[in-house]
Amino acid sequence: MLDTGVHTDPAALQELTDAAERQHTEVGADGAVAGYRAGRTLRLGVELRRQLRRRRTQFLLGFVALLPFILVVAFEIGDAQPNRRSGGFVDLATASAPNFVVLALFVSGTFLLPMIVALFFGDTIASESSWSSLKYLLAIPVPRHRVLRQKAIVSAMLSAFALALLPLVALIVGVIWYGAGDAISPTGETVAFADSLLAMLLSVVYIVIQLAWVAGFALLLSVVTDAPLGAVGGAVLVAIVSQILDQITALADLRNYLPTHYSFAWMDLISTDIDWSNMASGALSSVLFGTAFTLLAARRFATKDITS
């Protein structure tokens, strides 16, 4: 008899045989292994911890928290006048902590805030494809709709946290450096500190809703391409182009249909007589764009040939 050099313990072999038989009998009529529940796969807590451990998440959140300090240094180096009572939002930035928060949101609203949302949503599926791990994730199996939903929810949580972190840190920094004074609008109106806190909270809520279109579009690009940078960069590029087109007055009322036309409507909250019309239009427009892009992403992902 040929000796292969492998000696099998008869007891161990019997145990493996019994285990295989048990596994065979525990397979249900639908072909699923007994105990398998699609709802238990890719849990939010697991995906959230996984994303928080990524360097890009840590770097982005760190930069968002650092930005208010950079702005303070810029004003300390420059020629800021804390007692100024008129001018634009930049001129009034050092008048009080609420005004400093408004400045932080204003200067980051054109590029940084859309980029944050685009990064979390555009990288979510495309990164799995680029790592060649998406097909293994689906083979667990995790249903495709659940993969997309869970990753989108985690991306939304991280985006909302980052968008809220900026004004929160800016408020703390502003109170320390400039005091908890009244918010002053460019028209000279003053809003009490307590009322301005509510206005800032509503501003963050509006910004989160308004950037829903970026989230949906970045998610669509993420399922279309296997290149994370392409998905993120594409969403940011479209946001920038939309902002450029919004500056062309020759387009007249056509600009109202651009997804970025109402990006800064939250500034209407810094007033004693708030006009809600622009914010309502901006929220509705963004929700419609975001919903359409998300549905397209779900349909594309459901039929996509996963090869990586």
Image: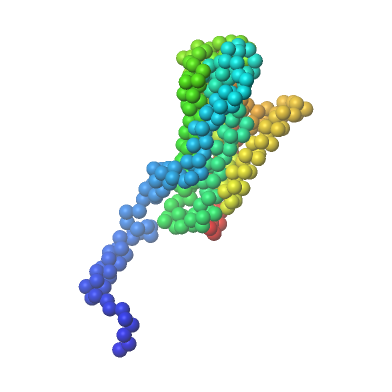
Name above or below for residue 201 compared with residue 59: above
Picture coordinates of residue 163, whole percent (x, y): 51, 31
Name above or below for residue 160 compared with residue 177: below
Observer able to see residue 287: no
Q: Which residue is located at x 49 percent, y 54 percent?
A: 134
On the image, which quarter does residue 275 sit in?
top right
Picture coordinates of residue 198, whole percent (x, y): 48, 19
Tell me the quarter of the image containing the N terminus: bottom left
Q: Which residue is located at x 57 percent, y 33 percent?
A: 113
Observer able to see residue 124: yes
Q: Which residue is located at x 72 percent, y 28 percent?
A: 247
On the image, which quarter does residue 25 sit in?
bottom left
Q: Is residue 43 left or right of residue 260?
A: left
Name above or below for residue 63 compared with residue 276: below
Picture coordinates of residue 3, whole percent (x, y): 31, 85
Name above or below for residue 134 compared with residue 80: below
Q: Farthest front residue?
A: 77
Q: Which residue is located at x 55 percent, y 37 percent?
A: 116
Picture coordinates of residue 42, whole percent (x, y): 41, 48
Please tell me which residue lies in front, 52 or 306: 52
